[in-house]
Image (tube, helix red, strand yellow):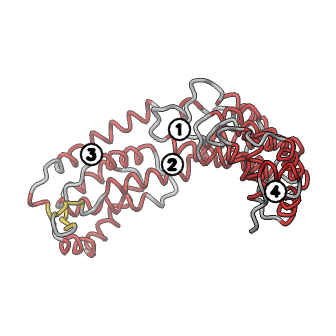
Amino acid sequence: MAVAKWIGLMVLLFTSHVFAQQSQVTASNIFTSEQVAKVERSHKLKERFDVLLPLFLDSELEALNYNLTTLPVIQREYLFYLFCQYAMDVNYLDDKTQAWLEQLAMARPTALTEKQHDADFVVSEPAFDYPAQARAALKSWRDKHQHLDFHRQLSQGQLEVEAIFNSNNPYLNEQQASLARVLPMQTPKRLLWLEDQIQQPSVFFADNLIIATMANLNSSEALYRRLWLRPVDQYSMEAAWWVKNNYPSQQAFELLKIAAKNPELTEHAWQLMAELKPMPSAAEAYLVSALASDDMGEVAAQVLAQLNDRNVLTRLVKIVTEGDPAKNQTQNAWLSLFLNNSSEARKLIKQLFELDSIRKNYGPVQQQ
């Protein structure tokens, strides 16, 4: 780390005189679209780029910067843009070149062109936005190569988890995406090691990507519990779907019950329970009991209405024939039967309204 900082300082010293020339924006730095296009078409600048390219490839950046200082600002910034563009496709960026790109990424272009927006105002924009291109090159490099470093570090038990997962890490999202790519390649031993590491209270997660991925790979109930206690995002919802599709029905139900305790996941978890095949009897009983809920009873009714299972319909009939008509559970059981479009449900409703007790409490069945 100290070496990288020293390299960055040296590159900053060598490039400061270049950027100092670009600190003032004057009228002479405003270029027309025709002037910008002329620079882009210039064969001499293309040749200049080809001549200077070996300096870039050999990381002789001080010499490269010196050569660029002799050019007018618009030509210099165009060549900066070309070098940053070229960096997108190279196979290797050493520390010195990365530091150089980081300096370019923080620079402010002074070769500007004016563009009219609507009819009311004119906006000055960079003629060649090389800082944005430098940032794109650095991101591309990290995306392409960081996962290889993480794979090596993790396989050796040397991954610095807290260095990645902390709220001050500006590259947290990129780095955790790279880490997620290599997790399926790891041995069970290394995955268990990482699970232990991410349980530390100092580890910060911006979202649920890593916890969900680890829970799925390790089949870890502890991680599923932690995951579904956190604010819900696409990864926590996808993990519930993964459980439904990859666990035996009874085990999936037990895990989805954990997810359902999070109010933001309740409906999603119930829906997945209803899709379990075969449907565990415990899941049927659980969803039927949810009909009594003041807040979620109607949701449970809608979920149960999707099921044509004879056992579920029998449970609903038992509730409406034996339950108190004023209670939530009874009313929601009726709702579930009426929402069920199956011929079996319609047949049961007709039979129910042939019962004196039902006709007394609810009146005659409405003909559809």
User: Disc 1 designates what residue?
Assistant: 206
Identify the mark nearer the N-term, 3 or 1: 3
Identify the mark nearer the N-term, 3 or 2: 3
Q: Which mark is residue 165?
A: none
Image coords of residue 363 (percent x, y): 77, 55
Amino acid type of disc 2?
A: Arg
| SS for callout 1 | loop
Of all residues, the one furthest to the top in this rendering is 201
Amino acid type of disc 3?
A: Thr
Give the distance between the C-alpha atoms of the residues marked 3 and 2, in whole angstroms. 23 Å
- In which image quadrant can residue 306 be found? bottom right
Establish if 108 lies above or below 89: above
Identify the mark nearer the N-term, 4 or 1: 1
User: Disc 2 designates what residue?
Assistant: 142
Q: Which of labels 3 and 1 is toward the front?
A: 1
Image coords of residue 8 (percent x, y): 36, 38
Q: Which of labels 3 and 2 is toward the front?
A: 2
User: Disc 4 designates what residue?
Assistant: 307
Identify the mark nearer the N-term, 4 or 2: 2
- In which image quadrant can residue 350 be found? bottom right
Q: Residues within 10 Å of mark 2 (few under 14, many from 20)?
A: some
Q: Which of labels 3 and 4 is toward the front?
A: 4
Give the distance between the C-alpha atoms of the residues marked 4 and 1, in whole angstroms. 38 Å
Give the distance between the C-alpha atoms of the residues marked 3 and 1, in whole angstroms. 35 Å
Image coords of residue 197 (percent x, y): 66, 28
